[in-house]
Amino acid sequence: TLPLISIIGRPNVGKSTLFNRLIGKRRAITDPTPGVTRDPIPETWLLGNNRVTLVDSGGVKLDQEGLDGPVTEKSLSLLSQSDVIIFVMDCMEVTPEDQMLLKELRPYTDKVVLAVNKIDDVTREDLIWNYYNYGYQRVVGISAAHGLGIEELEDTLLGLL
Ligand code: GDP
Ligand code: MG
């Protein structure tokens, strides 16, 4: 089976936009309803010379609250099954949901790449530095919408395969 790379993050950080940017086509449906729980969408993706499976965890909530057991189990097993986790955060705001995900991701720190999204222009570049406080060795500033930082992200992902 192919290496599994999953895109994790709270609603609205830009996971689906990133997924589409990486895959290069409109496949993941950007979710009109934040937090809607649905199945992850896997897609085979060529990363450098490596075929991998990329999953947009869109809408998968990783907290225990307000969820039935199976969904939580499924989303948590996605974390443990992933070879690489792209954890997406928004450069403009960190919420309690982000904090919760940071906690859930703690056991998997070594396979996480923190992608700080919405770094759309140079005026936002300095915002990245705050995100080094979360303890991840790999932090990349990106703009999924504008296609910035994507090459650096891909190189960083390759380093974890
Ligand atoms: P998801 O819920 O994490 O899958 O987030 P989406 O991909 O659906 O994006 C949520 C919102 O953020 C949408 O309005 C996107 O257009 C916007 N967005 C995504 N990436 C960027 C980015 O790089 N810059 C800016 N400014 N907005 C973005
Ligand atoms: Mg989405």
Image (cartoon, helix red, strand yellow):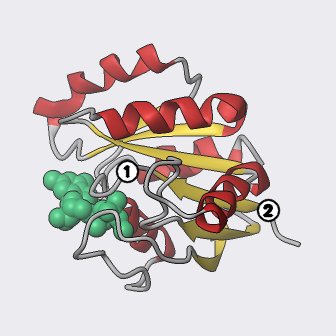
Q: Which residue is mark 1?
A: 10
Q: Tell me: residue 123, above or below residue 151.
A: above
Q: CA distance from mark 2 to mark 1?
A: 23 Å
Identify the image quadrant of the N terminus.
bottom right
Determine whether the residue tagged by mark 1 lies in a helix, strand or loop.
loop
Residue at (41, 84) in percent of width and height: 25
Looking at the image, residue 6 sits to the left or right of residue 57; the answer is right
Is ligand 1 closer than 8 angstroms to the Cβ of mark 1? yes
Q: Position of residue 40 (x, y in %)?
A: 56, 73
Q: Nearer the viewer, residue 153 or 62?
A: 62
Q: Nearer the viewer, residue 126 or 58?
A: 58
Identified by mark 1, the residue type is Arg
Mark 2: few/some/many CA within 10 Å (<14, 14-19, 20+): some
Q: As drawn, which residue projects farthest toward the right?
A: 1
Q: Is residue 113 visible?
A: yes
Describe residue 134's horizontal placement relative to residue 41 as left or right. left
Dot 2 corresponds to which residue?
Answer: 3
Residue pushed farthest left? Answer: 123
Mark 2 or 1, closer to the camera: 1
- Residue drawn at point x = 56 percent, y = 64 percent: 68
| Left or right: 109 as drawn, with respect to 138 | right
